[in-house]
Structures are given as structure tokens and as C-alpha cells.
């Protein structure tokens, strides 16, 4: 069956531009998570969705970061006015009933 | 606060056994997960422990001691393809199932 799909796989952008990262979770998974993996760092939690609502946004680093989920399925993470410190791999995971999380391959974001 | 520690790097020989340790300090512990991540790929689920003891799954086993805040991942009969990063993660109560990760252990398997 299909796993978690993320697009684009790589994104290069200029400082100050906005970017959108997309996540397609496994069908039927109600919970969706975004994490960030910076070079030499562990995965860092950003935001959690249950259905279309986001009960936990505590990991978003600044108000330049936002995310939404529509139809209980696809999620988009938006970073406005990107900065060089935003360069990282952004990983999405989904799970059924907050159990085992299955990850996508991530989007590698490079801000020049 | 939440803190998870694991060694940064380990090296082992093909065919041998290696143990990767993970210690954690968290409030509201609700399970410990191990993931494997090859460079440039998605982390893949290996094991889950919520009660004390050993869980065995083929060449991979994981152990948990909640009283000591300690887990290990045991890999037997190492193969070259086991060279990867191994991620220890803790789930806590009432936080929607989000995982708190350690920095990962980069395992190199040598011939």
C-alpha cells in the first residue's frame, strides 16, 4: 500500500521567499505530525493534527511557520520569509489513533 | 523537561552483535520507540516498548526498564545494510502521541 508521501523532495529558495511543503498521509490515518531534522540534530517536533484541527502547535519555532490540514488528509507546512536557519529536512508522519508513526522521506529545504 | 541521550556514533563488525543504549528523563512516560534511518530516507519503525522487558523481532530486540529510564536496541548477526542511524524516541501522556527524539546513533558496520 502507499506510504506517506511528501513533496517536493528538495527545495532551494532564496532568503525572504515563502515556501510550501506538502504531506500526503497514509489513507485512514487520523493523526499527522510534522518534524524538522537539522544537520547533526535529532528530530524536532513542530505540530500535530488530529483530523483537521491542530491541538498542539507548541513546536513551531516562530510565527513565520504555519500549517493546515484539509479534509482530514493532506497537510501543508508554510514558511514565510525564509531564513538560512530554516534550512533542514522537514519530515511528516501519520498514525492511526496516535500509535506507531510512519514517516515520509522528507523535504530537504535549502535557503540561500 | 524532557531529555533523551544516546551515543552519537558506534562501529561494529559484520556478523557481530551491537547494543545501542538510550537513557531518558521525561514526565508522563507512555512508550519508547526505535526507528532506523538510512541517509536521505524516511525513518522506519523497528520496535515499541511500553512495559518493562525484552521485545524480540528477528535479528532486532529492544529492552526497557522504566524505573531506570533506560532502553537498548540489540542487533544480532550484523549485516552491512544495518549501517544507518538509529533513533530513540519517547512518547508522553496527554501530548497527542508526539515523539521526543534523541539525537540518533550513527552505526557503521565494517567487514
Image (cartoon, rainbow, N blue to C red):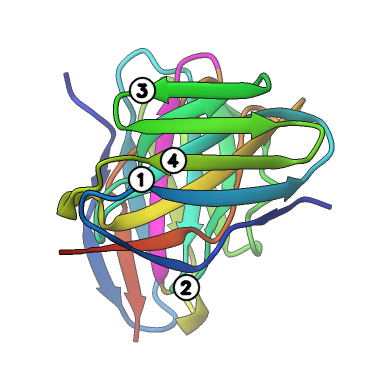
Q: Residue furthest front?
A: B16
Helix, strand or loop under label 3: strand
Q: Which mark is residue B74?
A: 4
Q: CA distance from mark 4 to mark 2?
A: 23 Å
Q: CA distance from mark 1 to mark 2?
A: 16 Å
Counting residues from the start of the chain, the first of labels 1 and 3 encountered is 1
Q: Which residues are magenta?
A: A88-97
Q: Nearer the viewer, residue A87 or B5?
A: B5
Q: Is residue A102 visible?
A: no
Q: CA distance from mark 1 to mark 3?
A: 14 Å
Residues beneath discs 3 and 4 located on the same chain: yes
Does residue B96 belong to the magenta stretch?
no
Residues beneath discs 1 and 3 located on the same chain: yes
Taking B23 as reference, is B55 above or below it?
A: above
Residue B66: x and y, percent?
75, 31
Residue B97: x and y, percent?
62, 28
Is the residue under label 2 in contact with that under label 1 (CB below 8 Å)? Answer: no
Residue B77: x and y, percent?
25, 42
Residues beneath discs 1 and 4 located on the same chain: yes
Amino acid at each position: 500500500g502507499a506510504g506517506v508521501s511528501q513533496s517536493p523532495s528538495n527545495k532551494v529558495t532564496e532568503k525572504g521567499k515563502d515556501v510550501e511543503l506538502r504531506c500526503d498521509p497514509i489513507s485512514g490515518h487520523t493523526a499527522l505530525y510534522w518534524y524538522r531534522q537539522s544537520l547533526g540534530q535529532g528530530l524536532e517536533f513542530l505540530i500535530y493534527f488530529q483530523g483537521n484541527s491542530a491541538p498542539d502547535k507548541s513546536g513551531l519555532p516562530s510565527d513565520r511557520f504555519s500549517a493546515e490540514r484539509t479534509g482530514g488528509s493532506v497537510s501543508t507546512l508554510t514558511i514565510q520569509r525564509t531564513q538560512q536557519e530554516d534550512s533542514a529536512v522537514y519530515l511528516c508522519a501519520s498514525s492511526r489513533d496516535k500509535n506507531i508513526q510512519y514517516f515520509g522521506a522528507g523535504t530537504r529545504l535549502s535557503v540561500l | 523537561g524532557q531529555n533523551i541521550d544516546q551515543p552519537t556514533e558506534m562501529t561494529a563488525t559484520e556478523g557481530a552483535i551491537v547494543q545501542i543504549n538510550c537513557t531518558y528523563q521525561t514526565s508522563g512516560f507512555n512508550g519508547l520507540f526505535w526507528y532506523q534511518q538510512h541517509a536521505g530516507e524516511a525513518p522506519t519503525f523497528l520496535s515499541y516498548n511500553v512495559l518493562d522487558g525484552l521485545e524480540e523481532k528477528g535479528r532486532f530486540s529492544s529492552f526497557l526498564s522504566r524505573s531506570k529510564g533506560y532502553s537498548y536496541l540489540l542487533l544480532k548477526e550484523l549485516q552491512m545494510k544495518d549501517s544507518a542511524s538509529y533513533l530513540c524516541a519517547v512518547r508522553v501522556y496527554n501530548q497527542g502521541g508526539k515523539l521526543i527524539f534523541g539525537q540518533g546513533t550513527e552505526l557503521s558496520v565494517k567487514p
